Image (cartoon, rainbow, N blue to C red):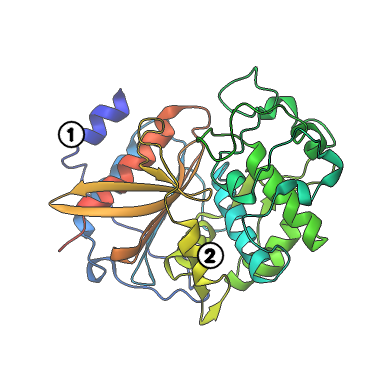
């Protein structure tokens, strides 16, 4: 309730605080003065003051890229540019990007492929076809639900095992694949396993070679299970600035520093809404391939955006029409206030835009 009142009734906060300067040059990202980017600096001072003075102090970083340039970079509570941070399930959205790269490279044909083609040892006569796209849409039909501890596909029941795939693929079917959206970790895990199978690499190494290194992302950590598989469902550690680079890549239709890292067609397909989930997920309107879609109506303007979301308030927003990327990192894990706070900060940033 404290966050709700403070954010909804923000007016001013001290006035003595100033915005930090970017902490040195970042490869392929030029800098721009905040005032010249179309964002009101005075409004941002108020937002930064509010973050810094409101307990509990578990907000970590805020990076804004505007018009292909670094407009604002702020860190909080002992964190700084070089600190890598667990963005939790936002890692699923990066797994979707890696699948696009795998398709671009011919390792996977298309998203209509049956996932049992890659793991035929688990195929049974009664198995229904589960397409790769069914996993990407969180609609596999398998008994996997992150919010149901009794679900056999809940991560609590397989993360500690050596053979993740061997536990998840034999699960019973709860509904026809593609029929409805049910949030789970198993879908992203299986996408990662398919990429690993087809590339012959751990997903974290595949990501380094084909995504992170091209973007100048050198410091990262991606959780590996006891069986050796990368946790494609989350627990990826990135700096806030590198998190923002992922958003910039998406904003630029898969291009980075003049090179096409991921095909434009995949970015478009990934960002196409597949399910309306506004009655299920606060702040979201639709769901694509491991990416959420949202919409805010602010100051007479309608902003449509794409975003990656991780527990604790780790959010990455991409607003194509404004050429805007906002990356927020926070460690309010397991608490809904983290998501609310980061969404509210994003909304306030939109309100500070000058038209």
The residue labelled by disc 2 is 266
Crowd rating for badge 1 (residues with CA inside 10 Å; few <14, some 14–19, many 20+): few
Percent x, y of residue 170: 78, 32
- Give whichever of 156, 114 is nearer the camera: 114
Name the residue rendered at 66%, 56% in the picture. 220
Callout 1 secondary element: loop
User: Does 46 appear above or below 109?
Assistant: above
Name the residue rendered at 69%, 51% in the picture. 221
Q: Can residue 345 be seen at all in this image of the molecule?
A: yes
Crowd rating for badge 2 (residues with CA inside 10 Å; few <14, some 14–19, many 20+): many
Q: Can residue 202 be seen at all in this image of the molecule?
A: no
Residue that lies at the very extreme toward the front in this rendered image: 125
- Give whichever of 106, 83 is nearer the camera: 106
The residue labelled by disc 1 is 9
Residue 117 placement, left or right of 350:
right
Residue 295 placement, left or right of 277:
left
Residue 321 placement, left or right of 26:
left
């Amino acid at each position: 309730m404290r966050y709700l009142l403070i954010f909804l009734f923000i007016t001013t906060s001290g006035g003595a605080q100033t915005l930090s300067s970017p902490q040195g040059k970042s490869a392929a990202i030029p800098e721009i003065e905040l005032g010249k980017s179309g964002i009101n600096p005075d409004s941002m001072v108020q937002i930064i003051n509010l973050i810094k003075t409101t307990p509990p102090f578990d907000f970590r970083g805020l990076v804004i890229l505007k018009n292909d340039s670094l407009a604002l970079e702020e860190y909080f509570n002992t964190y700084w540019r070089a600190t890598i941070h667990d963005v939790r399930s936002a890692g699923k959205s990066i797994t979707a990007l890696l699948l696009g790269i795998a398709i671009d490279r011919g390792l996977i044909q298309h998203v209509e492929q049956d996932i049992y083609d890659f793991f035929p040892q688990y195929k049974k006569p009664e198995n229904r076809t589960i397409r790769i796209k069914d996993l990407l849409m969180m609609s596999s039909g398998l008994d996997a639900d992150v919010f149901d501890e009794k679900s056999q596909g809940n991560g609590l029941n397989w993360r500690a095992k050596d053979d993740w795939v061997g536990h998840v693929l034999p699960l019973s079917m709860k509904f026809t694949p593609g029929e409805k959206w049910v949030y789970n970790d198993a879908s992203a895990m299986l996408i990662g396993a398919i990429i690993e199978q087809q590339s012959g690499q751990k997903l974290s190494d595949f990501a380094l070679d084909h995504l992170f290194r091209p973007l100048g992302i050198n410091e990262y950590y991606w959780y590996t299970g006891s069986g050796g598989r990368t946790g494609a469902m989350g627990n990826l550690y990135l700096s806030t600035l590198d998190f923002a680079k992922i958003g910039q890549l998406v904003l630029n239709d898969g291009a980075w520093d003049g090179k096409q890292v991921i095909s434009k067609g995949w970015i478009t397909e990934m960002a196409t809404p597949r399910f309306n989930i506004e009655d299920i997920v606060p702040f979201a309107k639709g769901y694509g391939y491991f990416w959420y879609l949202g919409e805010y109506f602010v100051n007479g303007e309608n902003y449509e955006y794409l975003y990656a979301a991780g527990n604790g308030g780790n959010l990455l927003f991409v607003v194509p029409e404004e050429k805007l990327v906002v990356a927020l990192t926070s460690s309010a894990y397991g608490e809904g206030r983290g998501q609310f706070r980061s969404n509210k900060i994003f909304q306030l940033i939109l309100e500070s835009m000058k038209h």
